[in-house]
Image (cartoon, rainbow, N blue to C red):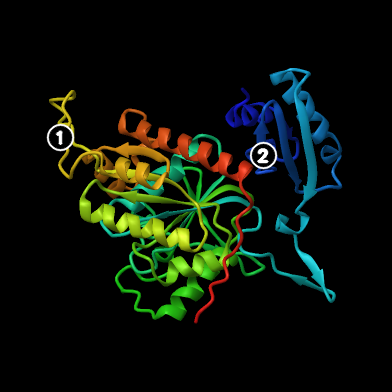
């Protein structure tokens, strides 16, 4: 029996020459369905005028028949979303600005129901792990009141530049493009803003930043379910959300509410990550101590039918590296970095599968009674 994962693996051999990326990574494969030897999907081609656009359907047919046999029945349609390329459009003789999210294949929110669960640490290490795996990655710290990225990347004194067309140019480190309110305000002063100002700042981060072409833009959200979360789903089409929790019952209760919020605004939760899962003393590497409870996030994931992306142990080196501005995933000598790498690989798989089999996400219009 043909599996969706095997179909995607076969299609990953087809590379768009201009970008050098395969069509699954680019998000071109949509509405994928497999049924008793029949494979159907739509190719969402970014530029239908290119030479590759005329060849890609035939290349898909050859790849799939080569993988599953000449008898495989194929139903491959083509469509185009050229307007969402991030190209400037001419409107009444003037150049219209691009929409937030243009040129970005996947926008992933990393969220938590409560503070103190290590969400920012997870977001930073995931972003770097994706970049080290060869993906084009951006990381936006939209926790306006408590930005963490400047410290975790060792860029406390750095300031982004502004391009000639008045776009913010993100900083870059470890292969990740970075933007944070911490780069824009005095670190000694608190950000004391009401909701409308926060909303405006988040929109500017997403719409007035020169992100370029990205495979993933990771959004490090503040904890809870407030203005920033609602602004995001109204501003950009999120491909998915990742919920970070610890095993504690109080954290899991808040994580459940976080999942519920994304369900209400029609954003798929692509996975749960359990942080601080267990503690292993260096002198007793075979021992695991479940200081905050055992298996709580896994049980929640199973109950809500959400993928469990991984469990991150409680280790001092994670905190030390974060304070030093070197995410632990950059240290090849630290085994815990491999945990983040494995979670990043699992995240890519879940997101690409979700993109292929489900309708594309759209900005959400929230109606108030």
Q: Choose between 212 and 118: the one closer to the eye.
A: 118
Judged left or right of residue 88, residue 316 is: left
First-in-chain label (1 vs 2)? 2
Residue picked out by circle 2: 32
Asked if disc 1 and disc 2 are in contact, CB closer than 8 Å, the reply is no
Q: Choose between 18 and 25: the one closer to the eye.
A: 25
- Provide residue 258's location: percent of width, then percent of height: 37, 59
Task: Tell me if residue 72 comes above or below residue 307 in the rendering.
Answer: above
Image quadrant holding the N terminus, namely top right
Q: Residues within 10 Å of mark 1 (few under 14, many from 20)?
A: some
- Provide residue 172's location: percent of width, then percent of height: 50, 50
Which residue is located at x 42 percent, y 34 percent? Answer: 341
Which residue is located at x 85 percent, y 74 percent? Answer: 93
- Provide residue 272's location: percent of width, then percent of height: 38, 45
Task: Tell me if residue 193 comes above or below residue 73 in the rendering.
Answer: below
Task: Tell me if residue 142 comes above or below residue 50 in the rendering.
Answer: below
In which quarter of the view is residue 5 placed? Answer: top right
Which residue is located at x 71 percent, y 57 percent? Answer: 84
**Which is closer to the viewer, label 1 or label 2?**
2
Residue picked out by circle 1: 289
- Residue 331 shows in this picture: no
Residue at the front extreme, as displayed: 36
> At numbered mark 2, what does the secondary structure look like: helix, strand or loop?
strand
């Amino acid at each position: 029996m043909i599996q969706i994962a095997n179909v995607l693996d076969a299609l990953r051999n087809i590379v768009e020459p201009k970008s050098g990326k395969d069509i699954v990574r680019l998000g071109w494969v949509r509405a994928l369905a497999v049924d008793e030897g029949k494979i159907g999907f739509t190719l969402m081609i970014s530029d239908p005028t290119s030479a590759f656009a005329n060849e890609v359907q035939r290349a898909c047919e050859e790849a799939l028949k080569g993988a599953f046999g000449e008898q495989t029945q194929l139903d491959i349609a083509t469509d185009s979303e050229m307007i969402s390329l991030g190209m400037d459009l001419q409107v009444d003789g003037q150049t219209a600005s691009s929409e937030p999210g243009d040129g970005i294949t996947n926008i992933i929110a990393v969220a938590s129901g409560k503070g103190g669960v290590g969400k920012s640490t997870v977001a930073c290490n995931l972003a770097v792990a994706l970049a080290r795996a060869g993906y084009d990655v951006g990381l936006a710290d939209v926790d306006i009141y408590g930005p963490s990225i400047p410290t975790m990347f060792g860029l406390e004194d750095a300031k982004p530049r502004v391009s000639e067309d008045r776009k913010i140019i993100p900083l870059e480190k470890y292969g990740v493009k970075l933007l944070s309110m911490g780069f824009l305000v005095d670190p000694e002063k608190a950000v004391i803003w009401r909701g409308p100002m926060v909303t405006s700042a988040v929109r500017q981060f997403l719409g007035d930043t020169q992100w370029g072409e990205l495979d993933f833009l990771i959004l490090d959200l503040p904890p809870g379910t407030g203005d920033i979360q609602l602004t995001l789903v109204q501003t950009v089409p999120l491909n998915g959300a990742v919920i970070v929790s610890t095993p504690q019952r109080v954290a899991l209760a808040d994580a459940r509410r976080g999942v519920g919020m994304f369900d209400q605004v029609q954003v798929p939760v692509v996975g749960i990550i359990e942080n601080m899962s267990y503690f292993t003393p260096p002198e007793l590497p075979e021992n695991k101590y479940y200081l905050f409870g055992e298996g709580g996030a896994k049980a929640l994931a199973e109950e809500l039918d959400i993928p469990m992306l991984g469990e991150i142990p409680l280790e001092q080196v994670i905190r030390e590296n974060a304070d030093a501005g070197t995410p632990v995933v950059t240290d090849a000598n630290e085994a815990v970095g491999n945990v983040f790498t494995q979670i990043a690989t699992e995240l890519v798989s879940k997101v690409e599968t979700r993109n292929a089999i489900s309708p594309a996400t759209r900005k959400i219009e929230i109606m108030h009674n």
